[in-house]
Image (cartoon, helix red, strand yellow):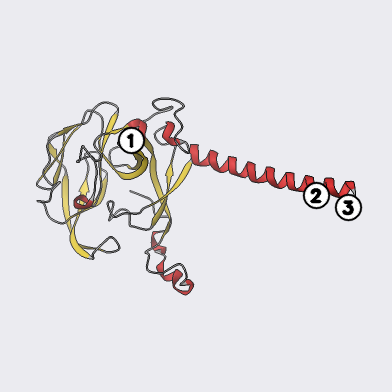
Amino acid sequence: MSNSMAKKNTGGWAESIKTVVYAGLIAIGIRTVAFEPFNIPSGSMIPTLLVGDYLFVSKYSYGYSRYSMPFAPNLFEGRVFGAVPKRGDVAVFRLPRDPSQDYIKRMIGLPGDRVQVRNGILHINGVAVERKPLGPYTVDGDGPRMTVRHYRETLPNGVSHGILEMSDDMRLDNTPEFRVPEGHVFAMGDNRDNSQDSREPGAVGFIPLENLVGRAEFIFFSWDGSAAWWQVWAWPFAIRWGRIFDGVR
């Protein structure tokens, strides 16, 4: 092989490696400052989010902390360009007791709020949150199939969303009153009787604003799990086509 051919081959490999490196850096940059994909592995946010939903989370919504970056390097404390979530936002955060775990819940209590559940009814700052029945809802794809109660809950700022209740006397349907500390938020799952959230101080508790990763924006893919990886012919029927590009509200 001539020297010119060898140089050409070496140059070609070098360009390919550079292209891959540049593409990787761009992807990391987008994931850090703009959007990051997440998938939903559990049913704690049914009916808003289903097991098998894949969604994009906006990283810029609440500013940036160490948890905005891959591997959460301990480069600085607090948030840069920080903002407090709006009541009713669905957001991803790092679990306070184990920051290696990502959770997604609805932001219910803001700094200074008083939050309590009484007989299944959410109270914020001493006022009962409006809850209207929508009829039965069948939960499928998250453990045993069951039918529960479906409600439309409207928060004080007008944000309206669905919630599920098995009954109004389950373990977390009557809580003490929680006062949200400054610099923290209080989160709850929409599947109220099947959610580990801020109502359990030892498991989740109050969430430091620093632990917020971003706000859930829209679903880009949804899979109901009815087809195995090798059942190629069944894939189109396992995709929840109607959920693709749905906004998260």
Camera-side residue: 19 or 91?
A: 19
- The outermost residue toward the front is 1
Question: In terms of image quadrants, where is residue 66?
Answer: top left
Mark 1, secondary structure of its residue: loop
Q: N-terminal of the two: label 3 or label 2? A: 3
User: Which numbered marker is on residue 85?
Assistant: 1
For the residues marked 1 and 3, what is the alpha-carbon distance in whole angstroms?
63 Å
The residue that label 3 is drawn on is 1
Amino acid type assigned to the residue bearing label 3 in the image: Met
Q: Where is residue 180 in the image (x, y as percent from the top left)?
A: 22, 31
- Between disc 2 and disc 1, the foreground one is 2
**Is tag 2's residue or tag 1's residue first in the polypeptide sequence?**
2
Mark 1 crowd level (few <14, some 14–19, many ≥20, 10 Å Cα): many
Mark 3 Cα shell of 10 Å, populated few (<14), some (14-19), many (≥20): few
Q: Which of 20 and 162 is in front in this view?
A: 20
Q: In this view, does 67 lie to the left or right of 136?
A: right
Q: Which amino acid does label 2 sit on?
A: Asn
The image quadrant that residue 155 belongs to is top left
Q: Which of marks 1 and 3 is nearer the N terminus?
A: 3
In three-dimensional space, the C-alpha distance between marks 3 and 2, rounded to whole angstroms, equals 11 Å
- Which structural element holds mark 3? loop
Is 156 left or right of 42, judged from the image as shown? left
